[in-house]
Image (cartoon, rainbow, N blue to C red):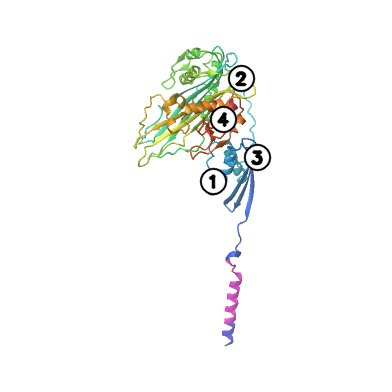
Amino acid sequence: MMKKLVSLLLVLLLVTSLFGCAKPADSQPKTEAVKLTGTAEGFGGEVKVTVTKEGDKITKVEPVGEKETPGIGTNAIDQLPAKMVEKNSADVEVISGATITSKAIIYAVNNALDPAKFPYPVAKEEPKKEEPKAEAPKGEAGSIAKIGLGQNISIAKSKDATADATATAQADVTIAAVGFDADGKVASITVDVAQTKVAFDKDMKVTSDRAAEVKSKKDLGPDYGMVKASSIGKEWFEQMEAFENWMIGKTAAEIAGLKVKERDESHKNVPDVPELTSSVTITVESYIAAVEEAWKNAEDAHGAEKVGLGVETHIGSSKDKAADVKPVAQMDTYMTAVALDKDGKVVKSIVDVAQVKVNYDEKGVVTSDKTAEIKTKQELKEGYGMVKASSIGKEWFEQMAAFEEWMIGKTAAEIAGLKVKERDASHKAVPDVPELTSSVTITVDGYQSVVAEAIRNAR
């Protein structure tokens, strides 16, 4: 009997100790919220963010950018936090028209999450000491009297899908922003190329990042990678700088008369004059053609002291193959030539868009004519056909003329600060000022962006 009582007591003690060790569900330790701060450089100054995390989960992102442009940069401040929380990452698409502020917020969040990998301020590399280079010969010209924007477009390098390779569309848009003096001589010139590729998979679905920044050859700088194959050890931007310098002080006709030679099948017009032999081995026919067109279309720009080129390309409108849709690579290159006075105000601007489409059939074979002339929106004029859908009955080139006129006399900050409104999902930055209400209903954020770049790069 005693043994049974002892056993019973031991069982009761064991059960009691087990219950004593257990904790109710609501007493389990909760993950504490942690607040992290980060900083990056925005359009108007520093952008700061506070990131709240609970464990591995981002629960809140609070950006502050007091000097970011109202109605443009503030769109990114308002919209990006929710996207980051939803994705639990800073790896989100930028807000259209607010690229600089968007990138600042993204970097600031990364700086908060991983300051070692994303430091602020960003350490500047000490410039490497290089041997002084012989400067390319540069001619002389008078003050700027006219500006022109010239371009030419090729899709000839687009490739069909084959048994061994998937399809790739390629658009090469060559652009020249040129300032001419009263005698028609080049006084300022910038040439660039938007070499844009859209890749497809075996099912003709776009594999290129539709939201990624597409850099021009000048934007790429050393990353273009031509120096490896260069017989003179010079990158594309270096050779173009030498060619631009050579064109200063010459008329379009003199430039077109440059003596050239054929180096190989891909280089049929390489300069063959002593002053360029050691500095330019690229083929130059498309650059010369762009300068000739710039002169042909040149407009008065009295009081101009500098001219800049702005270029920006997007592939977001490209289409995958679907049951009722054939695959299309669409490459939209925005371009502008902007002339500035001594105070940095716009004297004249010419804005254009090359909306380049490469059509494929369901098997991945290019159906577009690779040799056909591709016209820009300015060249198409009424042929662009926007007037049918315009609430004010105006074609694209007419609306752009009004926008260009509005920009005259304004600084980069004033143009970026234009009050805008969202008309619909495709028109998120339509001018909302009385002087443009009846003349411009297109969305202008892309044009503001290239004008800002042209002003930054003016020379």
Which label lies toward us, 1 or 4?
A: 4
Instruction: Determine if residue 239 is in view.
Output: no
Earlier-in-chain disc, 3 versus 2: 3
Earlier-in-chain disc, 4 versus 3: 3
Residue type, label 2 = Glu
Q: CA distance from mark 3 to mark 2?
A: 33 Å
The magenta segment is 7-24
Residue type, label 4 = Glu
Left or right relative to 374: residue 301 = right
Q: Residue at x 50, y 14 (%)?
A: 252
Earlier-in-chain disc, 2 versus 1: 1
Q: Which residue is mark 2?
A: 305
Q: Which residue is mark 1?
A: 83
User: Where, quadrant-wise, is the N terminus in this rendering?
Assistant: bottom right
Q: Which residue is mark 3?
A: 66
Q: In which quadrant of the rendered view does residue 119 lie?
A: top right
